Amino acid sequence: MHQTRMHQTGALPLHMQISESLIRDIAAGRLLDGERLPPEREMAAGLGLAVGTLRRALRTLEEHGLLMRVQGAGNFIKARAEVDSVYALFRLELLAGGGLPSAEVLSIDRLPKDPALPRFGNHAEGHRIRRLRLLSGCPAAVEEIWLDASRAEAITAPDLSESLYHYYRERLGLRILRAEDRIGLGRVPAWSPAAFPPPPGSLLPQVTRLSFGQDGQAAEASWTWYDPATVAYVVRLK
């Protein structure tokens, strides 16, 4: 079984980091249908966790229909194609599969919308969020995300969680239910940090995303430039 040692960094609660990492490993085929997980105390020790924290994460998997507990035998994976999880719409994975997403906020500004973006929302301004994306601690992508200004008066870095969609849901009452992605090529922007290996100006795969809320309206648009030497863009079809 693939294991990633968890840390209490970032705004997502630790038990959620664990459950999301396991969900992504199941989706990537790193944890197989019917696979027996290690005993809970052994698994918790391997991840550097308290047993109670692990059990809370495993309860989340059970609620999602991804785990079967057999008295006296242990915990067994029940694989499913799609799960309504925090990172359900996050399509980047390590080349070996899976990887726990995290992010470093580079800047947040409220500005007139960039006319090169797909059309979204009704406000003339948007909140522009620039981030470095990591997967299991490895720099994987840089993002420029624009949220329509009608959805929030102001956003500050301490407000944000590792998952913007989690933040939108918990703090703004906005649920992103679907997204449209278009993949092409684009130049790494000049603001990209030194921690992202491809230098500014490099030609990389670029994802242009338009995200829709529970009201059916486009609430967010974004660009993501990802490093194909580290990650792949993955969509699994039923």
Image (tube, grey):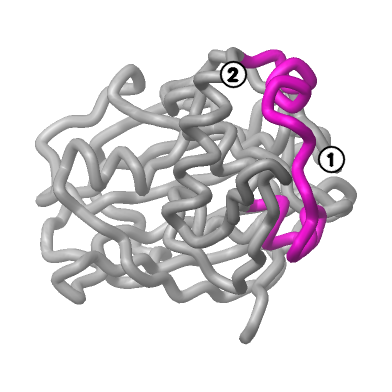
Q: Residue 135 at what x, y percent from top left?
A: 70, 38
Q: Is residue 30 left or right of residue 88?
A: right
Q: Residue furthest bottom?
A: 238
SS label for mark 1: loop
The magenta stretch spans residue 154: no
| Foreground residue among 70 and 217 | 70
**Residue ID for mark 2:** 51
Checking the image for residue 159, the label placed there is none
Residue sitting at x 64%, y 83%: 237
Mark 2 or mark 1, whichever is nearer to me: 2
**Residue ID for mark 1:** 2
* Residue type beneath disc 2: Val
Is residue 148 placed above or below 235 in the rendered structure? Answer: above
* Residue type beneath disc 1: His
| Foreground residue among 90 and 200 | 90
Structural crowding at the residue carrying mark 2, measured as other residues with C-alpha within 10 Å and reported as few (<14), some (14–19) or many (≥20): some
Residue sitting at x 34%, y 63%: 115
| Foreground residue among 137 and 47 | 47
Magenta highlight range:
24-49
Q: Residue 40 at what x, y percent from top left?
A: 68, 28
Q: Residue 71 at what x, y percent from top left?
A: 61, 45
Residue sitting at x 43%, y 24%: 13
Q: Is residue 235 left or right of residue 168?
A: right
